[in-house]
Structure formats: C-alpha cells, structure tokens
Amino acid sequence: MPHLSPKAELRAAIDRLRRGIPPEEIEARSRAAAEHLLALPPIARPDLSTVALYLPLPGEIRTEAIWEALVGRGVRCVFPRVERGRRVLRFYPLRPGDPVERGPLGVRQPPAIDEVPLVEIEAFVVPGQAFDELGGRLGRGGGYYDATLAEAPHAERIGIGFDEQLLPLVPMLPHDVPLDWVVTSSRALRCQPGRTRSSARGPW
C-alpha cells in the first residue's frame, strides 16, 4: 500500500468523520454556523454588496441559511464555477431556486451567465477539510481556492466547517493562502496572523 502524505492522511480522516454525522445533525449545525457567520463584522456591515458562497458537497456545512439571509439583506451572492485547464475560479450570481449545473469535479455550479469580477467580491466563504486558528486551511487538493484567493487580496477570507474540523495545526505550503476568519457551529474565530506556524503545536 503506498504511503500517504500528511495532507492525504488528514483528508481521509476528516472524510471518515464527516460521513458519520447524520443528515439532520448537519442541518442543525449548519444553521448554527450560519448565525455565527452572519454576525461577523465584515458580513454584518450594512454596505456589504457581494459575497462568494459555495454549493455544498455531501457532508459539508450547508449554505442555504447564509444565502437566504444575505439575499434578504440585498447582498449579491455569487458562486464558483470550475473550468478545465484553469485554476482560478470564476464566479456567477445565483438567487435561491435558480437552476445549477454539474461541474467537471461533480460539484454543483452556476451557469456561465453574468460573470462577476473577483475585484467586486468583498468576502469569500470557503469550505475545507480542516482549519486552524492561524488561518490554515486544508482543501481537497485541487488548489482552486488558494489560486483564487491569491488573486483577490482585498477580500475577507472566511473558512467554515464543523467543530471537529478545527485542529491545532494543519499542514501548509508556501503557496497556501491563509484565512482571516474560521467559523464553526459553535464559534467564530479571528485568525492570528501575528503568530508563526513554527511556534504552534499540532498533530499534523
């Protein structure tokens, strides 16, 4: 059996953990996480105009409650679209109930209509496999969000997941883009850019 890298081992462990969460518990935890996220200073401000969300895969925090609340506030919600041969995601607006498509990675995505430039997006709400308090995020390995966030340094970067996905430390590479906030179903954390990863201790 081939040896797995620390990142691959961690992804597999988180996948096993999330498969054990019952659907009704995912729904309840997602609504609790939505309350914390909607209260964040960069999201609660009255002049917020455009937020990037995601259409969840099975086992991820659901975004419907966030989406509906933001639309109710008059905020434009945009969603990522994966295109083959391109690492930086493109974003398109959706309203609740709009039709979506199946993307090349099996992820639901918006039709390619009325693209919204990255410069207009004020906050990105992103999923992940694991997070830490230093802003570390472990994705699924494609590097799409890291490439995208690197092109939008002006925007707030908010990771969202279950409490079990918040770890003492996740493995990061130089090209991985840190988060500004991490939100779970029990709390919201402002990440600590002043701390160094070498001073932190964790199992990974």
Image (tube, rainbow, N blue to C red):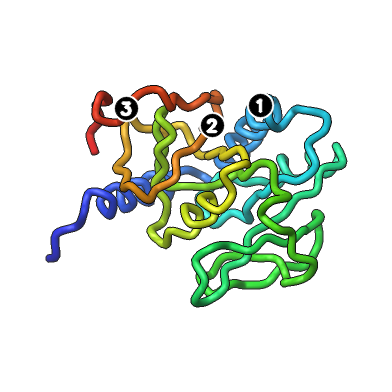
Foreground residue among 167 and 194:
194
- Identify the residue shown where x is 62% and y is 66%: 81
Badge 2 density bin: few <14, some 14–19, many ≥20, Cα 10 Å: many
Q: In the image, residue 106 lies at what x, y percent?
A: 53, 70
Amino acid, disc 3: Thr
- Label 3 close to label 2 by CB (< 8 Å): no
Badge 3 density bin: few <14, some 14–19, many ≥20, Cα 10 Å: few
Foreground residue among 85 and 54:
85
Find disc 1 in the rendering and name its residue: 40
Is residue 20 visible to the viewer in this orientation of the structure?
yes
Q: CA distance from mark 1 to mark 3?
A: 24 Å
Q: Quadrant of residue 112?
A: bottom right
- Label 2 close to label 1 by CB (< 8 Å): yes
198 left or right, relative to 88:
left
- Identify the residue shown where x is 52% and y is 71%: 86
Considering only order in the chain, which callout, 1 or 2, is on the residue closer to the N terminus? 1
Find disc 3 in the rendering and name its residue: 196
Q: In the image, residue 52 lies at what x, y percent?
A: 67, 49
Quarter of the image that includes the N terminus: bottom left
